[in-house]
Amino acid sequence: MKEQASPPRVIRVVATTVAIRVLVDRAPKGLSKRDTIWTASVLANAVPQLGRPKGSFVGKDAGRAVEIGTPSETADVVATLPGGTLRIRGKSRSAGATEVLPVVGGTGAFRGVTGTLSIKDIDGGPRSSNIYRLRYPPDSRTVAADS
């Protein structure tokens, strides 16, 4: 029987936004407090991981965010990766030029995970560096390995 690789504790991807839709645009016009947007992105490996080389497509994410005042927002996003999904939900916080959001669960290989998603824009365009730092539940049958 082939042994299955442990899921990583850290996942580094480049997210490229492929769709943005304004769901609610409250006054003033344009992105402002209490506006709701929906975005979708494709995810590519920033480093070799998840059994695939650097630069390869490894998943997607989609979800909504409500602006609650610059630079904070609340988000509800699902990221689909090889082996399962990650749920990102809650209020963001800023750490310099990086936005940090809570990871509150997952499915498949990521069942029961918690942690953070750190997002940093790349050159002000549609791409960002996304780093998932995950903690697995103590009762998990899989021992997570650093990647």
Image: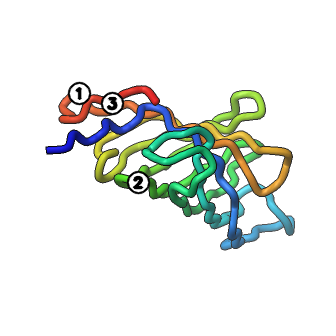
Residue to which mark 1 is pinned = 138
Residue to which mark 2 is pinned = 82
Q: Specify the amino acid type for callout 1.
A: Pro
Q: Which quarter of the image is occupied by the N terminus? A: top left
Q: Specify the amino acid type for callout 3.
A: Ala
Residue found at x 61% / y 61%: 42
Q: Which mark is residue 72?
A: none
Q: Give how far apart the Cα atoms at labels 1 and 3 are.
A: 10 Å
Residue 133 x %, y %: 49, 32
Mark 2 / mark 1, whichever is N-terminal: 2
Q: Which mark is residue 144?
A: 3
* Image-based side of 37 in relation to 106, left or right: right
Residue 13 x %, y %: 59, 45
Mark 2 / mark 3, whichever is N-terminal: 2
Residue 59 x %, y %: 51, 58
* Image-based side of 73 in relation to 26, left or right: left
Tell me the crowding category of disc 2: few under 14, some 14 to 19, or many 20 or more residues within 10 angstroms, Cα based: some
